[in-house]
């Protein structure tokens, strides 16, 4: 059974699979090893994903969506053509492309996958990511943390037992984890981070600087023009990349706007020193999570055997220098920051698929078969108690999986139901933490306050996803409590999204088939016309007439757009192509 590992990123995504015992990154249909996490919708209803969506973004900004990962687990929606797309649905489009690319590369059907998430993703964000995989037609074997996956990719090639820090600064999120690598065991000791800090913020800072300078020079506000704003942001991202290897670069955007005097062009030189000054606060914002992770792990920076940099934003020289100052260690350069997360996910996918295969009587795959991965809860789970207090039930950095039980009771006399607010966060007051769900236990026997005893169990699986059940100890009745959350998709919504995704996958295939058929038809017309030119005088009149008529029949349909053709036209077009083929 082939299983893949997917790094579903904010800016770029990557897919890998284990082949011959080694995790291999899979190139996409365009030949690149990473795929832009961009989705676009054309005016004729076509859905574009990846590089092709990114290329048309400046001309189609209102129908192009990027950085959707930042909205996972929220009620954010993207309206397109009268429909509001959820983050799960948009992410599923990216995942489906990655799956298709993997199937084409591996020449087999792929359904099983391990998908990575930032270590600091909460329960809702992890559930949303799993839902996205389901919509994409994937059986999500496991959700694992990105820093853990990176350590996994690193650890199998560096057998020495050691503690490593993974500093993961991606496009939209920042995580730092302290991980212990031992003999066949990779254990996360502590994790910390910021879900709203990443390369996008560096791009935005430079883009704002460029637009402010342009407004000061010309009086024109580029931020008011979506297309111009996107062009500036793309140029800012490119300049950021260039400044990682050179000390100065020039942003040149001709015809970016115009005023009464005519066209206006943006041209500005940016030095690395200027960029570092613009983004200094962003780099400094990574300090607190680093120190927190070390403190929670109970170790000093000097005890680290290695520091791994993950995520494209760690290529920024100022970031690398900051990490070295914080840890006193030169970061390792033995792993690819863009690919190692997908490779680690592929190793875990292979391990899980191997275990499933073995349990079903299959042969074991040597590499990774005995690997034990111990991850942790990134944030504490708490419940709201009297007075709005957040009472901790599971502490952050507790090793997964977890089973925890606690007995609750009623706060008012003769209550017949109890509502419990479940949160994630570290703040002492409930209002300052993130509510991930509320559940209600109904049918409690009427009794004075404090008499009923309700045993509530919290189970967090290896994906870091929480489920809750409850038992009324007084009656012995056990009830399953479903955590309800308005920001999650219901089972019906997920089923509808799956059907929609499959429908559009079929339509995309039909569109590709139509394009291939038109290309073949045009080639036949070219061959026929060349034959008429070169052999026309020697051809029999009836044969010549038949060939010309056949060419005319095919050209009649080539002049029509595929999407405008009726089913009967498409059938007649196929017949016309076949007739022309016979005559050639």
Image (cartoon, helix red, strand yellow):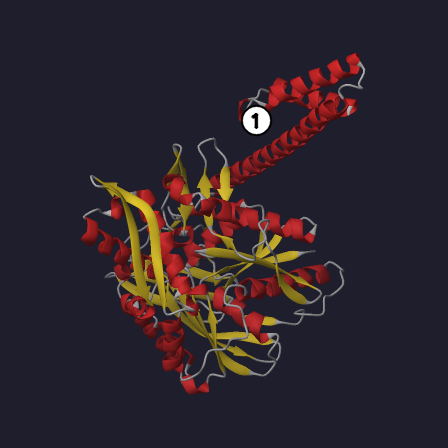
How many numbered marks have been drawn onto this rendered protein structure?
1
Residue at the far front in the pictured view: 537
Q: Which x, y percent locates residue 242? A: 41, 64
**Is 484 or 538 nearer to us in this picture?**
538
> In which image quadrant can residue 195 be found?
bottom left
* Above or below, 487 relative to 370: above
**Looking at the image, can residue 455 be seen?**
yes
Residue 294 position, x and y percent, is 40, 79
For the C terminus, the quadrant is top right
Label 1 packing within 10 angstroms: few (<14), some (14-19), many (20+):
some
Seen from the viewer's position, the closer of residues 511 and 434 is: 511
Is residue 420 something that shows in the picture? no
Q: Please name the residue that numbered disc 1 is placed on.
A: 562
Q: Is residue 318 left or right of residue 506?
A: left
Please state the horizontal and vertical placement of residue 293, each as a whole percent of the image. 39, 75
The image position of residue 342, as x and y in percent, is: 55, 62
The residue under the point 47% across, 58% down is 465
- Of all residues, the one furthest to the top in this rendering is 542
Front in this rendered view, residue 50 or 220: 220
On screen, residue 154 above or below 106? below
Residue that appears at 80% across and 19% down: 538
Identify the image quadrant of residue 448.
bottom left
Q: Quadrant of the N terminus?
A: bottom right
Q: Secondary structure at mark 1?
A: helix
């Amino acid at each position: 059974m082939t299983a893949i590992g997917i790094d579903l990123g904010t800016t770029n995504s990557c897919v890998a699979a284990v082949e011959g015992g080694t995790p291999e990154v899979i190139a996409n249909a365009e030949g690149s090893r990473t795929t832009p996490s961009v989705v676009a919708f054309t005016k004729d209803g076509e859905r574009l994903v990846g590089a092709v969506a990114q290329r048309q973004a400046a001309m189609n900004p209102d129908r192009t969506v990027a950085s959707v990962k930042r909205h996972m687990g929220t009620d954010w929606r993207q309206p397109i053509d009268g429909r509001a797309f959820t983050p799960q649905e948009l992410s599923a489009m990216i995942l489906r492309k990655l799956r298709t690319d993997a199937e084409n590369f591996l020449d087999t059907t792929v359904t099983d996958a391990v998908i990575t998430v930032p270590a600091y993703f909460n329960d809702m964000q992890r559930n949303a990511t799993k839902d996205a995989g389901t919509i994409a037609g994937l059986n999500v074997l496991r959700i694992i943390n990105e820093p853990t996956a990176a350590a996994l990719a690193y650890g199998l090639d560096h057998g020495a037992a050691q503690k490593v820090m993974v500093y993961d600064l991606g496009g939209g999120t920042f995580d730092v984890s302290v991980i212990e690598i031992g003999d066949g065991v990779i254990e996360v000791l502590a994790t910390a981070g910021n879900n709203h800090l990443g390369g996008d913020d560096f791009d935005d800072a430079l883009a704002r600087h460029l637009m402010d300078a342009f407004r000061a020079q010309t009086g024109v506000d580029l931020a008011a023009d979506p297309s111009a704003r996107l062009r500036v942001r793309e140029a800012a991202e490119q300049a950021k990349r260039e400044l990682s290897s050179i000390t100065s670069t020039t942003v040149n955007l001709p015809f970016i706007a115009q005023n009464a005097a005519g066209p206006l062009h943006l041209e500005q030189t940016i030095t690395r020193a200027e960029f570092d000054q613009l983004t200094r606060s962003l780099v400094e914002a990574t300090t607190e999570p680093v120190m927190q992770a070390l403190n929670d792990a109970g170790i000093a920076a000097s005890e680290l055997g290695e520091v791994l940099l993950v995520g494209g934003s760690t290529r920024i020289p100022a970031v690398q220098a900051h990490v070295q100052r914080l840890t006193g260690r030169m970061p390792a350069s033995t792993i690819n920051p863009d690919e190692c997360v997908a490779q680690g996910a592929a190793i875990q996918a292979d391990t899980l698929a191997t275990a499933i295969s073995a349990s079903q009587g299959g042969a074991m795959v040597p590499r990774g078969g005995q690997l034990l991965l111990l991850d942790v809860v990134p944030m504490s789970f708490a419940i709201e108690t009297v007075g709005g207090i957040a009472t901790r039930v599971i502490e952050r950095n507790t090793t997964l999986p977890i089973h925890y039980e606690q007995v609750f009771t009623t706060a008012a006399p003769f209550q017949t139901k109890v509502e419990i607010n479940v949160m994630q966060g570290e703040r002492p007051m409930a209002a300052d933490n993130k509510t991930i769900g509320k559940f209600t236990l109904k049918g409690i026997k009427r009794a004075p306050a404090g008499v009923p005893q309700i045993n509530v169990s919290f189970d967090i699986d290896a994906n870091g996803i929480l489920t809750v059940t409850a038992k009324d100890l007084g009656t012995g009745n056990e009830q399953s409590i479903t955590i309800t959350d308005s920001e999650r998709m219901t089972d019906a919504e997920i089923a509808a999204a799956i059907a929609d995704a499959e429908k559009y996958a079929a339509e995309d295939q039909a569109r590709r088939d139509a394009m291939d058929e038109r290309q073949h038809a045009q080639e036949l017309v070219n061959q026929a016309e060349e034959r008429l030119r070169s052999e026309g005088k020697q051809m029999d009149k009836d044969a010549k007439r038949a060939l010309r008529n056949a060419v005319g029949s095919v050209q009649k349909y080539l002049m029509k757009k595929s999407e405008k053709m009726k089913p009967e036209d498409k059938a007649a077009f196929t017949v016309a192509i076949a007739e022309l083929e016979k005559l050639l």
